Amino acid sequence: MTEHHVRSVEDTLEHLSVNPEEGLDEAEIRRRREEHGANRLSEAGTASPWKILADQFRNLVIAILAIAAALSFVMGEIVQMAAILAAIVINAAIGFVTEWKAVRSMEALRSLGTVQARVTRDGKSATVDSEDLVPGDVVLLEAGDVVTADLRLIEANGLTSDESALTGESVPVTKTTDAAEPDAPLAERTSMAFKGTAITGGSGAGVVVATGMETELGGIARMTAEASEEATPLEKRLDRLARNLVVVTVIVAAAVAALGWLGGKDLVSMLETAVALAVAAVPEGLPIVATVALARGMWRMARRNALVERLAAVETLGSTSVIFADKTGTLTQNRMRVARLALPGQEEEVSWDEEARPEAPSPVACRLLEVAALCNNAELEEEQGERPAGTGDPMEVALLHAAAAAGLARERLLDDQPEEREESFDAETKMMATFHAQDGGFRVAVKGAPEAVLDVATQVATDDGEAEALSGEARKTWAERVETLAAEGYRVLAFAERHVESAEAEPYEDLILLGLVGLEDPPREDVPDAIERCRRAGIRVIMVTGDQPVTAAAIAEQVGLAEDPQATVGRDLPKLGDGAEADAHDGLRDNHVFARVSPEQKLDLIRLWQEAGAVVAMTGDGVNDAPALKKADVGIAMGKRGTDVAREAADIVLKDDAFPTIVMAIEQGRTIFENIRRFIVYLLSGNLGQVLAVGLCAVIGAPLPLLPLQILYINLVLDVFPALALGVGESPEGIMDRKPRDPKEPVLTRAHWVATALWGALIAASVVTVFFVALERDMGQDAAVTIGFLTFALARLWHVFNMRDAESGLFANEVVRNRWVWYAIGICLVLTAAAAWLPGLSTILDVVPLDSVGWTLVLTGSLVPLVVGQAALTLWRLFARGKTG
């Protein structure tokens, strides 16, 4: 693809062996279609439901449970086996439902090409399906057409193209037939028209140089398909935690079984003990609770205009340390407006706010705005409202809005000054002119690039409606004013007029300069505050755009990304990924603005920060953003202005396109992780208590205080509700004043493991104590096991209150305030009562009726961990306060 934009028209036609007047004949079209294939993008292979379902069983936790189920079957424990298999099926079903997501990015890309194209074939004009185009086809272009293949332009009459979705360029690009520079970025290849873009003005023709996956759009499609979708930090952490638990489970179960067997115990009984330990160690409820906690965060975000495609992305966004933000439509409003007027006789530029409805502009300002409305091909819709929508070139729409704000509607101006002739914008003259009947002659309205208009202007307007000569010194002053506006990030147009006798007169001679207009795509008003919140939260925001560097730097300064930011241009970026350029890479990480970057360079920049250990979020709305959205740890697409391709490649879609919504999502993500960490400690400490109690009794040769089915009932039924309640807690105060977590930090730190061990030992000690008391009182083994089971069930239920922050109060804390905790306690009390007294269920669980002594042991044993835990937390709080005081 790279050579086509640098070839001349003649070389291109010769290379493709085509006469632009005749086009290709049918025989040649068939031959080329066989060689190059249909002009469409390849379909991405989607994972089948069966593969996704099979993947749910490919993890070590499921393997441990499967082995336990097999051992139960060998030992004839069919009910126990069925219960374990039920746990496996439930986990698999939840994983399948949450991961069933088809890859639709490629289908969305393909839909961009399913239109018709007007071509010249066999010397005749014809309309064909875009998929039938082949290299060498001559395609005719007019305003409103969608470009259906990559074209080398051979004719351009005021031709402009909207390439924002492909390049990030916020305004239409003027096309020409002149060859571009060899190293020109995509946005500056003005001799080309690219598949998937739209013609906004003028007319022209181009010869097809690439079709299907060989087009620039096809290259992006290929990158999107090939970009590795990163496993999220939460997925990595939970996977690492699960593997560690499996290793510990196997070691403990094998050691206990071996020690018991070597000590003279029966092998079958030791295998039963191993099964009990395996079931006790594996937190069966963890996937369920993690999924629901993430889903709750997703629901909260959806209520605030953020739609989540991947559940784990909620937490990942909370650990984000770098956000790559696209400029157009993300940090800016994606609508051009007139912001400044530079007028004759006024040294300072005039700020223009159309929403303020300026009154009585100066006479020369009125003349300028009249010309801006007359020399214009855009239209405003006839609708009520502050700013009616417009069709056409965004800059021309902005000029119409500015004129309308001054009471100069284009329709009324044309009633008084009918248009008689138009001189379309030309890439060589860089100007456009329209002729309007006025006072028996013609008024010529001219707009164009400032340097072009200044070159042909000989006079400058005055406030009295006349004009004076434009001296050399004045011309130099106007050039400086152009540079000043451009340096501030404005797109600058110059306006002029002249009066002639004939509509056939030369439009670009002896012009009267009326002034300059500075247009901008203004930043969103809520962005600066959001960026400041990101800064306080330790999150680095970096602008990555395909727009001009001066414009990008100006917007970056306005939204507060950095003071006096310098934009790094894509062509100046070193080739990333080479270890020999580590110093250059470190320097790039200090930059806040990257402009004129290609889709490949966006991928490189994301990879650069990921290799440095950052968790990267990427925002975008265009086709060109799709590969980067997929490569980033979290891809965030704009819902209003975003393309289907961007939305399908992203993890999160913002319905309101508001950057502050990302900050809200970050807060939710941080909250979710804290909640997940809290309920993991809750679940593991309870499971550890089970392992310690069962293991201790097995080693000393005593009966087991818990049976495998009882452990499953506690882990899969009773534990889930309190853990769920912990998982949906509200955001703690000050969570957005913390720095992002180290992505290498595990789910549980050393402090969390110590706390888990202490809580587990406390619960195990309490349960084992009441269990042995029951045995010593000759209450019978069945009653003792029942006491152990019910004590464990209630102890773990009250244990939820031990999950409060040590710095919080005994009653004023996030757990007590969480209404879901109280609902969970109510549900679990009913389920515990069912296990004790419901016929059938109590039989399956081997629970027998207890007398008053037995229930006294159950209540006492279950409350001890709560009382001791609350006392320890209160003492820790007092100690911490005394230390800081």
Image (cartoon, rainbow, N blue to C red):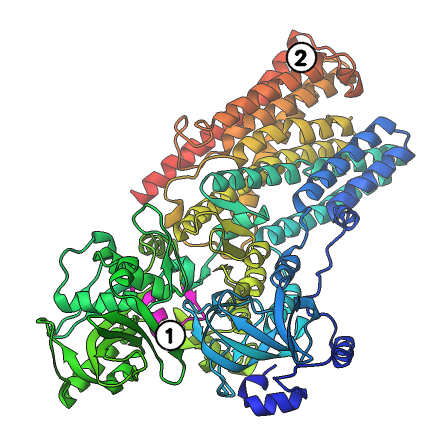
Write the residue at 58% across / 59% down.
645
User: What range is drawn magenta here?
Assistant: 542-560
Residue type, mark 2 in image: Gly
**Which residue was labeled with disc 2?**
854
In the rendered structure, does residue 553 fall within the stretch colored magenta? yes
Give the side of residue 406 with respect to residue 229, left or right: left
What SS does tag 1 mark?
A: helix
Gap between marks 2 and 1, in whole Å? 78 Å
Tally of numbered tags? 2
Closer to the camera in the image, 603 or 151 = 151
Write the residue at 47% across / 38% down.
303
Q: Relative to 397, does residue 484 appear above or below in the rendering?
A: below
**Which residue was labeled with disc 1?**
549
Q: Earlier in the sequence, mark 2 or mark 1?
A: 1
Please provide percent x and percent y for residue 655: 47, 47
Please provide percent x and percent y for residue 785: 74, 21
Closer to the camera in the image, 262 or 820 = 820
For the N terminus, which image quadrant?
A: bottom right
Please provide percent x and percent y for residue 537: 38, 53
Give the side of residue 347 with respect to residue 585, left or right: left
Q: Relative to 416, does residue 864 appear above or below in the rendering?
A: above
